[in-house]
Amino acid sequence: MRGIGMEEKILQAIEGLKNDMDHKFDKLSEKVDNQGSQIDKLSEKVDNQGSQIDKLSEKVDNQGSQIDKLSEKVDNQGSQIDKLSEKVDNQGSQIDKLSEKVDHQGSQIKENTQILKALEHLAQVNKAEHDKMSFNIAEISGEIKAIRKDLSNVEIITASNWGDLAKLKSVK
């Protein structure tokens, strides 16, 4: 009986080990099942994140095309700025030319002013000479009138003398 008792003990020990293993296996199976559901949840989250990444990628692509459009607009504005800059440069050279003309006209005005002042001075000198000539003419005119009066008196006296001479000649 010892052999049978031992066998039974071994069988009981094996049965205990089997039960213990079954129990551990059930716990492991539960854990695996729990981990499976956690994996399923994580998979769902990854799928959701994948769709979110797709949406973000779409947004990034849209923003890329918007950036391309804005870049194109900036390039166009750059060429417009270059054209405006050329126009401003052209106007600057025109302003320089006009400035030169104004400077030339300014010197011409100064020269004309000097000529005008000289002419005014000459006009004043001429007027003074004219006034002096008018005075001299008036003085000469007065002297001529006096000479004419004296000449008339001389003629009268001469005529009287001729009359006296004719009387004296007739008396002889």
Image (cartoon, rainbow, N blue to C red):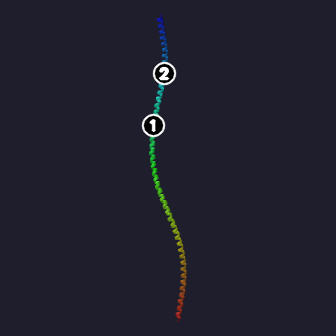
Mark 2: amino acid? Gln
Q: Residue at 54%, 79% (x, y): give it.
A: 143
Front tag of 1 and 2: 2
Q: Residue furthest top?
A: 1
Q: Residue furthest front?
A: 2
Can you give x and y, in whole percent of width and height, for residue 4 in the image? Answer: 47, 6
Q: Secondary structure at mark 1?
A: helix
Can you give x and y, in whole percent of width and height, for residue 97 in the image? Answer: 46, 55
Q: Which mark is residue 37?
A: none
On screen, residue 66 above or below 33: below
On screen, residue 2 above or below 101: above
Q: Which residue is mark 1?
A: 64
Q: Secondary structure at mark 2?
A: helix
Q: Nearer the viewer, residue 101 or 29?
A: 29
Mark 1: amino acid? Gly
Q: Nearer the viewer, residue 10 or 106?
A: 10
Can you give x and y, in whole percent of width and height, for residue 13 in the image? Answer: 48, 10
Q: Nearer the viewer, residue 28 or 13?
A: 13
Q: Residue at 54%, 89% (x, y): give it.
A: 161
Neighbor class of circle 1 (other Cα within 10 Å; few <14, some 14-19, many 20+) is: few
Q: Residue at 54%, 76% (x, y): give it.
A: 136
Gap in angstroms between the C-alphas marked 1 and 2: 41 Å
Q: Are marks 1 and 2 in contact (CB under 8 Å)?
A: no
On screen, residue 122 above or below 31: below
- Name which of mark 1 and mark 2 comes first in the sequence: 2
Q: Residue at 45%, 47% (x, y): give it.
A: 82
Neighbor class of circle 2 (other Cα within 10 Å; few <14, some 14-19, many 20+) is: few
Q: Which mark is residue 35?
A: 2
Q: Locate residue 132: give its quadrant.
A: bottom right
Q: How many marks?
A: 2
